Image (cartoon, grey):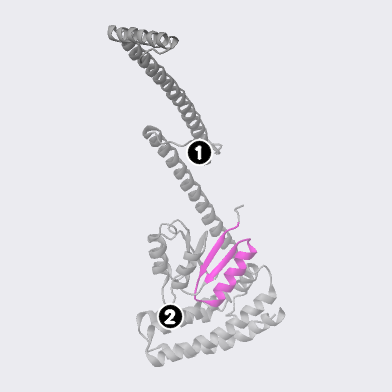
């Protein structure tokens, strides 16, 4: 059983649009309709669709042109396109399949075939969506490795990948843990280096002070200073002494 | 129930199944078919008069598609041949075949009215 999809019906024929809308609803899907190719492209730009049911012969813009546009757009090219055709239009159908259409559905519609084709297309799209998501998350882990080398890695960038229950999630969790340990170790080292620097600075200052205070010159000056202090204290004790 | 041999009731059954058995909706669709067919025949006459093969082809294509939905097999075949004439731009014999298609349409119409009225 496949989950419900949102389907775009592109057909200039009113009865086809009415029948398909009701048939898809009976099968649990939702749908929107477009009467021509241009309207279909507008709707694709404004909404999100899981499958496109596409007629070929339409005014303004035919099915070939719509299909070409869909396959050129990055956001649309993975949407399955099922060509709606009459049994005598096989050449057109083959052309569309060569252009990238996923499948075809002949008119008049057989409800069982409609269900089978839609469900197969939805399953294919969902698998593709999972693949794309997986590739995106692999890319996140690779970017994280680059960031670690550059020293710019931030721990929370892998949070979405770490939530996975598969091997990629496990890799991301191990990577994040190791990156956290490396980060903590670096912080400890930086603190130790800072403490050493302070110690070194203090030692250097003490040495510089010692070099000055233990010099003969300083000792001479200090001795003279002491003598002067003695003289001054002696003069203060005797009233009328000259300064 | 008596019926013209050129109405395929299997197609009607398939259609009804697609609609979840909703006979009222089927009746609505049949009415749309009648309205559409009248418009399409007018369109084909108009495009023949204007010599517009492409417009003729699209109208015949729609008539073909609609007729297939309702099991009007002979009318479907005529519309298919009219569409081909439009596609090739060879409309010399189109008026005659178009006339035959209109006669065939009047033959299937009562059977479809009966189905519509059952709903």
Helix, strand or loop status at disc 2: helix
Q: Is residue B53 above or below residue B12?
A: below
Residue A84 visible, this orientation: no
The spot of residue A221 in percent (x, y) is 31, 10
Query: Which subunit holds the residue at mark 1?
Result: A
Residue A8 part of the magenta-drawn span:
yes
**Left/right of residue A30 with respect to residue A88 in the rendered view:** right
Mark 2 surroundings: few (<14), some (14-19) or many (≥20) residues within 10 A? many
1 and 2 marks on the same chain: no
The spot of residue B49 in percent (x, y) is 40, 93
Query: Which subunit holds the residue at mark 2?
Result: B
**Outermost residue, left side:** A217
Residue A94 part of the magenta-drawn span:
no
Range of residues picked out in magenta: A4-33
Residue A147 visible, this orientation: yes
The spot of residue A59 in percent (x, y) is 43, 78
**Outermost residue, bottom side:** B49
What residue does disc 2 label? B83
* Residue at x 61% of width, y 71% of height: B15
What residue does disc 1 label? A156
Q: Is residue A194 above or below residue A50?
A: above
């Amino acid at each position: 059983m496949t989950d419900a999809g949102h389907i775009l019906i592109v057909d200039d024929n009113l009865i086809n649009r009415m029948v398909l809308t009701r048939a898809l609803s009976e099968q649990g899907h939702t749908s929107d309709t477009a009467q021509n190719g241009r309207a279909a492209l507008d709707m694709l730009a404004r909404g999100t669709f899981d499958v496109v049911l596409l007629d070929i012969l339409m005014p303004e813009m035919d099915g070939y042109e719509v299909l070409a546009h869909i396959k050129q757009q990055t956001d649309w090219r993975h949407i399955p396109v099922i060509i709606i055709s009459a049994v005598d239009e096989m050449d057109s159908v083959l052309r569309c399949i060569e252009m990238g259409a996923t499948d075809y559905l002949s008119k008049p519609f057989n409800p069982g075939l409609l269900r089978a084709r839609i469900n197969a297309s939805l399953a294919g799209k969902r698998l593709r969506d999972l693949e794309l998501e997986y590739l995106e998350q692999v890319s996140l882990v690779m970017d994280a490795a680059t960031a670690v080398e550059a020293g710019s890695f931030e721990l929370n960038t892998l949070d979405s990948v770490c939530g996975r229950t598969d091997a990629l999630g496990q890799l991301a969790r191990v990577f994040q843990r190791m990156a956290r340990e490396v980060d903590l170790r670096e912080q400890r080292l930086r603190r130790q280096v800072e403490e050493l620097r302070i110690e070194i600075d203090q030692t250097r200052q003490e040495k510089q002070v010692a070099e000055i205070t233990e010099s003969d010159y300083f000792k001479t000056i200090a001795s003279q200073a002491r003598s002067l202090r003695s003289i001054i204290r002696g003069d203060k004790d005797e009233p009328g002494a000259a300064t | 129930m008596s019926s013209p041999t050129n109405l395929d009731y299997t197609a009607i059954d398939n259609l009804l199944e697609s609609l979840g058995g909703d006979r009222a909706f089927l009746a609505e669709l049949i009415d749309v078919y009648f309205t559409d067919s009248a418009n399409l025949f007018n369109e084909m006459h108009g495009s023949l008069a204007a010599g517009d093969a492409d417009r003729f082809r699209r109208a015949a294509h729609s008539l073909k598609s609609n007729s297939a939905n309702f099991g009007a097999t002979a009318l479907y075949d005529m519309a298919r041949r009219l569409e081909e004439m439009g596609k090739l731009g060879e409309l010399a014999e189109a008026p005659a075949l178009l006339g035959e298609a209109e006669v065939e349409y009047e033959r299937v119409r009562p059977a479809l009215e009966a189905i519509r009225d059952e709903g």
